[in-house]
């Protein structure tokens, strides 16, 4: 799936393009209180819209009976379809807002939502080819610890629906500590 390459390109842009830093941070790596999952989802969606062929949409309805159930980002290039659930986790010392989540809990929350979405899409004959959990985060944990825990969380997919098992492609991590405040691009 070429989507992995686009995710990698997005990480490079976040790291080197001052635009992303200025939209999300105040100063000294403090995330603005206005930044919530919707804003981060929109940043990612806008990037995907510009860098993928096909349709990229927001709040895609995954259940015909429950209109409040919708995946964050849906993509359809005419051949393959993908859904992305966006979550964030900011430690208190890095976030001006008042909502703090554990990165592992939020990752599991995202996967649980993807499981529900994939199941309902399959039930309605609208299966997807790829499902991703996308985590924006900033904390002081070691990357090796985060990656080890993400592998364990990824292994929990075998306990989810067959719809998710067959389409889940991974957890994408975007460490916002790596975003650059200097104007390089």
Image: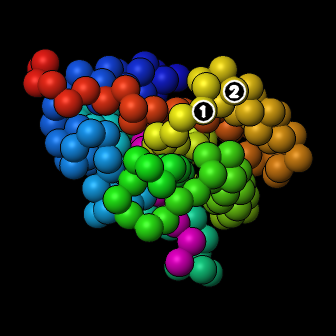
Marks 1/2: CA distance? 7 Å
> Is residue 117 part of the magenta span, yes or no?
no
Nearest the viewer among 166 and 154 is 154
Left or right placement of residue 166 versus residue 83 in this view: right
Q: Which residue is drawn at 46% across and 40% down?
A: 138
Q: At which x and y percent is residue 154?
A: 75, 35
The dot on residue 145 is: 2
Left or right placement of residue 2 versus residue 39 in this view: right
In this rendering, is residue 140 above or below 161? above
In the picture, residue 158 is in which quadrant?
Answer: top right
Q: How is colour applied across the structure in the image?
A: rainbow
Is residue 91 something one can see in this rendering?
yes
The residue that label 1 is drawn on is 141
> Is residue 71 part of the magenta span, yes or no?
yes
Residue stretch in magenta: 68-76
Does dot 1 land on a helix, a strand or a loop? Answer: loop
Magenta stretch secondary structure, dominant:
strand
Mark 1 touching mark 2, by CB under 8 A? yes
């Amino acid at each position: 799936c070429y989507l992995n390459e686009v995710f990698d390109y997005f990480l490079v842009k976040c790291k080197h393009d001052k635009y992303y830093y200025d939209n999300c941070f105040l100063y000294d790596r403090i995330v603005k209180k206005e930044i919530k999952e919707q804003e981060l989802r929109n940043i990612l969606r806008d990037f995907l819209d510009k860098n993928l062929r096909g349709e990229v949409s927001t709040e895609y309805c995954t259940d015909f009976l429950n209109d409040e159930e919708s995946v964050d980002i849906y993509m359809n290039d005419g051949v393959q379809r993908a859904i992305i659930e966006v979550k964030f986790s900011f430690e208190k010392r890095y976030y001006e807002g008042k909502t703090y989540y554990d990165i592992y809990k939020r990752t599991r929350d995202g996967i649980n939502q993807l499981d529900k979405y994939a199941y309902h899409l399959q039930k309605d004959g609208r299966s997807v080819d790829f499902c991703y959990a996308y985590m924006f985060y900033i904390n002081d944990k070691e990357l090796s610890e985060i990656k080890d825990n993400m592998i364990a969380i990824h292994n929990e997919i075998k306990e989810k629906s067959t719809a998710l098992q067959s389409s889940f492609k991974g957890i994408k991590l975007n460490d916002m500590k790596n975003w650059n405040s200097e104007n390089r691009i």
